[in-house]
Amino acid sequence: DIQMTHSPSSLSAFVGDRVTITCRASQNILTYLNWYHQKSGKAPQLLIYTASNLQSGVPSRFSGSGSGTDFTLTISSLQPEDSGTYYCQQAYSTHPYTFGLGTKVEIK
Amino acid sequence: QITLKESGPMVVKPTQTLTLTCTFSGFSLTTSAVGVAWIRQPPGKALEWLALIYWDDDKRYTPSLRDRLTITKDTSKNQVVLVMTNVDPVDTATYFCAHRRVDGNDAFDMWGQGTLVTVSS
């Protein structure tokens, strides 16, 4: 299975800060990388698909980049509603699809 | 508008069989490229993909649970069912069903609210 590793595992930032989360794959996954946001007690929400494509309805402060093994999710100006856990998921090897352990984002 | 909703027992005893149903609307599992997945999340832990069924009845399973899982669809009822045999307390989790994008970009774009299943005697 392809392993996905998040960095950092958690962070705390102020409203308005620029926040960057990274995800590393254990092998080359081209751009088959998706990002999800999950608030406590809720279902995950797709933010970015295929590394850099913004899902419909997702605010433009979210962006994704990367290819191969290293990927980045950036929030250009952190908002209070952005707290929660962010997961990356690879879709290169689909059986099984695998998720990272997540990055927990807290608002200071 | 795509919606999905999971249903099933809240508590199951060890060694029993768990049956979960995903009822959806806003799309059809007879349409080319459509897929519905099951994904679970133990309390406080990360997401784990379990199974996926495609419009053409192709089925895929996570290798570690393949022997215990069966996924089926009922297109007339707009439902996908996941059966897990011989459950154990480690199977305690919130179980989500999710719609797979159909435009060639492989991602889960809509999710149900999830249903918490506790395995306990």
Image (tube, rainbow, N blue to C red):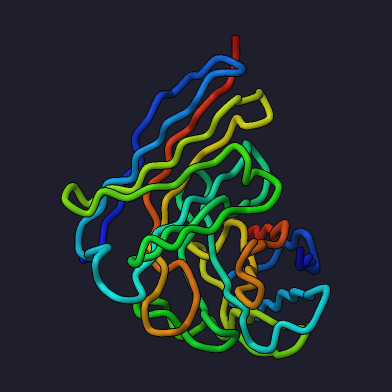
Q: Nearer the viewer, residue B90 or A41?
A: B90
Looking at the rendering, which quadrant does residue A103 occupy?
A: bottom right
Left or right: where does residue A56 sit relative to residue B94?
left
Looking at the rendering, which quadrant does residue A74 occupy?
A: bottom right
Q: Horizontal and vertical percent for residue A17?
A: 64, 77
Whether residue A108 appears in this view of the structure is: no
Q: Horizontal and vertical percent for residue B13?
A: 55, 14
Left or right: where does residue B78 sit relative to residue B56?
left
Left or right: where does residue B66 sit relative to residue B57?
right
Q: Nearer the viewer, residue B27 or A101?
A: B27
Q: Quadrant of the C terminus of chain B?
A: top right
Q: Nearer the viewer, residue A28 or B113?
A: A28
**Point 27% across, 63% down: residue:** B29
Instruction: Give the answer, above or below, for where A97 lies relative to B77.
Output: below
Q: Horizontal and vertical percent for residue A50?
A: 55, 84
Q: Nearer the viewer, residue B62 or A90?
A: B62
Q: Quadrant of the N terminus of chain B?
A: bottom left
Residue at the extreme top: B121
The number of discs equals 0
**Point 78% across, 84% down: residue:** A28
**Point 53% across, 34% down: residue:** B84
Residue at the extreme left: B76
Instruction: Give the answer, above or below, for where B114 lies relative to B58.
Output: above
Instruction: Give the answer, above or below, for where B67 lies relative to A96.
Output: above
Residue at the extreme right: A26
**Point 36% across, 75% down: residue:** B33
Q: Horizontal and vertical percent for residue A92?
A: 64, 78
Whether residue B68 appears in this view of the structure is: yes
